[in-house]
Image: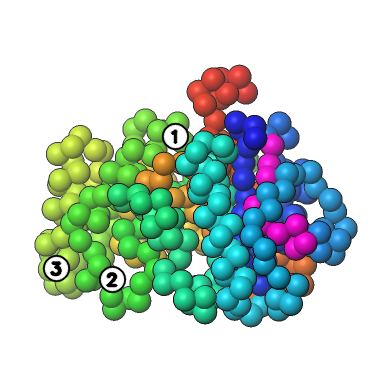
Amino acid sequence: MAENLIAITLGDVAGIGPEVVVKALASGKLPPTTPYAVIGSGAVLERVCRALGVRPNFELIEVGKFNLSAIEPGKPDKIAAKAAVEWLTHGIKLAKSKKIAALVTAPLNKAGLHKADIKVPGQTELLGKLTHARRVAMMLVGQFLKPPTIPGALPQTSWLRVALATTHLAIKEVPRAVSKQKILDTIELVHEWLPKFGIQRRRIGVAGLNPHAGDGGAFGNEEIRIIAPAVAAAAKKDINVHGPRPADTLFREAYNNEFDAVVAMYHDQGLAPLKMLAFDTGVNLTLGLPFIRTSPGHGTAYDIAGQNVASPASLIAAIRLAVQLSRTPEQKAASA
């Protein structure tokens, strides 16, 4: 295998994963000098290529002997889930042994995982479990165009990076799950990973949990008891961190490039503004793993599975980010 090989798992074949993988590889929008491999089922890929009328160039890594011919698009299926997890597990093995430069994963479905009796809420948690990582965090990265401030000027490309202190939880469970250590871990992971984007200032804004960041305890005291102490502990480690700040203004500050990344307390607090700005280019990056892992910012989209109408834009962005982050300093200098 080539040292700069990017491996892509097919994900849940009852969803749009195989479709967007093939479309992304056939798009002509990926770095042409990078080799790509797909971990999954050759029969599924053959069927999708035939349906789309394309045959992109990629290496196939066939893993497992699953009969996926009867999988119905748009319906959770335990065989599809088991196949997806086996492909993911193989990708992790390749990444840990440095046989690939980065791993890109097409979406899994939580209902399918539950049918297969796989008790994890999502891929981020599964990756952490399978790699025995001490700590992991989900960061969503989105690129978007900002309207010009000067009349007649061109829009500017900008980025929003949002890491989550908690991930897939019911809202009622979030206050119990937010802890000083979890927030501190997330801040530290963001601080460690921002240089991979070429960012040295590493300005991190931390959101409060409650409206107006609790307003001095009037709307909850998690900011006083938990979040502020975590921010203070990070600051003592010379991390450029600020908060807790009201989420409704913090994201405006990040939009205006006053912060390089935001730490949000829960899933929708962080992902709603990011997907508003960068739905088609949102990428899920797992911080804390011993390798680069990205995935599209969307799920399996069962409602449009099998219709050949899914957009590969987010997966293209995920692959491009994986290529960017996995390049060595020498490779980056050669392409500059």
Q: How busy is the neighbourhood of tag 1: few (under 14 within 10 Å), some, or many (20 plus)? A: few
Residue 330, above or below 100: above
Local secondary structure at mark 2: helix
Of residues 277 and 81, which is closer to you in this image? Answer: 81
Write down the residue under mark 2: 174
Locate residue 328, reporting x and y percent.
52, 26
Where's residue 192, x and y in %?
Answer: 34, 38
Residue at screen point 80% across, 47% down: 56
Where disc 3 sits, the SS reads: loop
Amino acid type at mark 3 = Asn
Q: Distance between the residues labelled 1 and 3?
A: 35 Å
Would you say the residues marked 3 and 2 are in contact, meaning their CB atoms lie under 8 Å apart?
no
Residue to which mark 3 is pinned: 221
Which amino acid is tagged 1? Lys
- In the rendered structure, does residue 118 fall within the stretch colored magenta? no
Q: Earlier in the sequence, mark 1 or mark 3?
A: 1
The residue stretch that appears in magenta: 35-45
**Mark 3 or mark 2, which is nearer to you?**
2
Alpha carbons under labels 3 and 2: distance apart: 14 Å
Query: Looking at the image, how many numbered discs can be counted on the residues?
Result: 3
Decide: is 248 above or below 231: below
Q: Give whichever of discs 3 and 2 has the lower sequence position.
A: 2
Q: Name the foreground residue: 259 vs 106.
A: 106
Q: How far is mark 1 from mark 2, CA to CA?
A: 30 Å
Q: Mark 1 points at which residue?
A: 196
Residue 307 lies, in percent from the top left, at 77, 72
Which of the numbered marks, if any, corresponds to residue 163? none
Q: Estimate how packed mark 2 is, as few (under 14), some (14 to 19) or many (20 or more) residues with alpha carbons within 10 Å.
A: some
Q: Is residue 73 left or right of residue 153?
A: right
